[in-house]
Image (cartoon, rainbow, N blue to C red):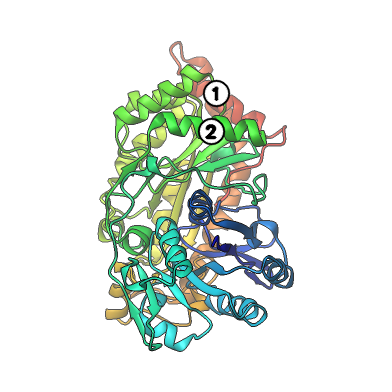
């Protein structure tokens, strides 16, 4: 019998803020009025796999639709699902449990499945403490979800389903071992976008035009940053997996035709690993004459000049680099394996090629002081990206960063609702309190706002200098001229 499966990313509303959960590597709160919305990749992939296996699905992204909880729950109940798969997160857990309970009360037959990035629910005791939840899928859940639904449909043996927390016939909570991660990404169908508000998803690094398609060309990351939750919690390892460039181009072409996107953005863990693969993809874009600007989440030290140029020639308009700190000691301590001098070189190279840059920085790494805060702010202004993001380091349970902070006595709370990554610090350092880190975040944004206000004058002076040089960089000249032009036309800067 075909099962009706509801997949939900419930609304997460706090006074003055909305939360982003599914699709985000650091579920957090955004101020009302912001536009940043990540695409719920895992839910959409799971829906596609379930439908391919013959099940009926309904996906509701309550965050993207900006609906109230009552409407979200009402629509879920109206579907009368046999199985309800809900993506949860550390900071939103009380809200996630409440929404699950409301659905369960109205649909007692529905099996409630939690998944997402919250290690505390990956233990059997979580089911004992929360009788509303019937199952928890651990980690990368999209392919495993269909195995669970099939087992529910056939009253099968749940112990044979990997990555699962479940109750046995006696009602005792148990768990299964993690299975192999998905290595053949090309075997997966494209995400099911049918039920989703596709023109609402918003992540425009460096000012790429909207509406913009978000997609993945790879999964995983071989680097071992202590704070990065997805490799440590969702994947459980650092294996890097890639898709066939032709299949990626097929997906882009279909989505552009279906929805009329004006750009696309690769929200990979790290897009630009493997120069040969990247160039093959760029050749594919050029061969098909897709002709849209695009952006990608990348590393600053994994591509050379020729690869950046190939990406630009294929339409790359903007690139995201994670930097985290202006202090090399803090970056080294975070095991990011990134030379800040290389960051300077890559940012300068991208600017010389006419590629906009979006950078991300965070406060609260071990060893953070007011001196390192100042270094980070100054470094950000020195690099002068088109857009940037500052945040507060949040140690998600299960990450190396969390264990380090717990062992050092630097965790300020285990109230999961405060692990929002954007407004509240749940850690301290030897020199800075949680309140200090929150102050550092406000200070950084205030200085950046002033820096942006004065940028047109700096760019104008730079343009004047370039015009006097007989061999000035034509791409740098065009880049700065276009940035000047943005003062007079409506171009939104990139999101978080």
The residue that label 2 is drawn on is 252
In the figure, residue 137 lies in which quadrant? bottom left
Asked whether residue 319 appears in the rendered view, the answer is no
Asked whether residue 307 appears in the rendered view, the answer is yes
Report, in whole angstroms, how far the alpha carbon at label 1 lies from the one at label 2: 9 Å
In the image: residue 331, left or right of residue 386: left
- Crowding at dot 1, Cα within 10 Å, few <14 / some 14-19 / many 20+, comes out as some
In the figure, residue 483 lies in which quadrant? top right
Please, is residue 8 above or below residue 172 in the view?
above
Q: Which residue lies at the image location 52% right of the left edge and 57% below the top edge? A: 43
Residue, far front: 1
Please, is residue 288 above or below residue 494 in the view?
above
**Sequence-first disc among 1 and 2:** 2
- Picture coordinates of residue 420, whole percent (x, y): 52, 69
- SS of the residue under disc 2: helix
Q: Which residue lies at the image location 63% right of the left edge and 30% below the top edge? A: 257
Between 353 and 341, the one nearer to me in the picture: 353
- Picture coordinates of residue 456, whole percent (x, y): 61, 35
The quarter of the image holding the N terminus is bottom right
- SS of the residue under disc 1: loop
Residue, far top: 470
- Picture coordinates of residue 41, whole percent (x, y): 50, 52
Q: Which residue lies at the image location 57% right of the left edge and 27% below the top edge? A: 292
Between 462 and 417, the one nearer to me in the picture: 417
- Crowding at dot 2, Cα within 10 Å, few <14 / some 14-19 / many 20+, comes out as many
- Whether residues under marks 1 and 2 lie with C-beta atoms below 8 angstroms apart, the answer is yes
Between 258 and 479, the one nearer to me in the picture: 258
In the image: residue 106, left or right of residue 314: right
The residue that label 1 is drawn on is 290
Please, is residue 339 above or below residue 158 in the view?
above
Between 343 and 228, the one nearer to me in the picture: 228
Which numbered circle lies on residue 419?
none
């Amino acid at each position: 019998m075909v099962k009706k499966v509801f997949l939900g990313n419930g609304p997460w509303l706090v006074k003055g803020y909305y939360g982003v959960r599914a699709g985000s590597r650091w579920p957090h709160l955004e101020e009302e009025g912001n536009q940043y919305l990540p695409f719920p990749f895992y839910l959409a992939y799971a829906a596609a796999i379930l439908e391919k296996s013959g099940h009926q699905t309904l996906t509701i992204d309550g965050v993207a639709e900006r609906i109230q909880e009552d409407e979200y729950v009402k629509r879920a109940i109206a579907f009368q699902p046999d199985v309800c798969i809900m993506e949860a997160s550390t900071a939103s857990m009380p809200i996630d449990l409440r929404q699950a309970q409301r659905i369960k009360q109205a649909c007692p037959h529905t099996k409630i499945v939690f998944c997402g990035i919250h290690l505390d629910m990956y233990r059997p005791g979580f089911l004992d403490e929360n009788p509303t939840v019937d199952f928890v899928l651990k980690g990368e859940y999209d392919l495993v979800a269909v195995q669970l639904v099939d087992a529910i449909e056939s009253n099968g043996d749940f112990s044979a389903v990997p990555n699962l927390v479940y109750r046995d016939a006696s009602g005792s909570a148990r768990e299964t071992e993690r299975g192999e991660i998905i290595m053949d990404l090309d075997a997966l169908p494209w995400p099911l976008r049918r039920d989703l508000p596709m023109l609402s998803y918003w992540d425009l690094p460096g000012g790429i035009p909207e509406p913009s398609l978000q997609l993945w060309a790879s999964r995983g990351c071989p680097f071992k940053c202590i704070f990065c939750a997805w490799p440590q919690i969702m994947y459980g390892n650092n294996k890097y997996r890639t898709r066939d460039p032709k299949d990626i181009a097929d997906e882009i072409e279909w989505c552009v035709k279906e929805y009329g996107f004006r750009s696309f953005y690769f929200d990979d863990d790290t897009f630009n690993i493997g120069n040969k693969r990247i160039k093959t993809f760029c050749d594919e874009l050029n061969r098909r004459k897709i002709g849209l600007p695009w952006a990608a989440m990348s590393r600053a030290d994994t591509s050379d000049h020729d690869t950046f140029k190939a990406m630009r020639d294929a339409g790359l308009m903007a690139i995201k680099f994670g930097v985290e700190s202006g202090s090399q000691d803090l970056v080294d301590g975070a095991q990011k394996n990134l030379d800040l001098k290389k960051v300077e070189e890559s940012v300068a190279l991208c600017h010389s090629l006419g590629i906009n840059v979006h950078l991300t920085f965070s406060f609260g790494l071990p060893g953070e002081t007011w001196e390192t805060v100042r270094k980070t702010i100054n470094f950000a202004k020195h690099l002068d990206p088109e857009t940037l993001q500052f945040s507060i380091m949040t140690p998600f349970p299960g990450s190396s960063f969390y264990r380090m902070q717990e062992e050092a006595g630097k965790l300020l709370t285990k109230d999961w609702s405060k692990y929002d990554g954007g407004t509240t610090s749940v850690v301290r350092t030897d020199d800075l309190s949680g309140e200090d880190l929150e102050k550092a975040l406000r200070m950084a944004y205030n200085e950046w706002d002033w820096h942006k206000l004065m940028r047109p004058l700096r760019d104008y002076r730079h343009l004047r200098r370039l015009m006097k040089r007989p061999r000035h960089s034509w791409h740098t000249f065009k880049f700065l001229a276009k940035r000047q032009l943005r003062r007079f036309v409506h171009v939104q800067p990139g999101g978080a």
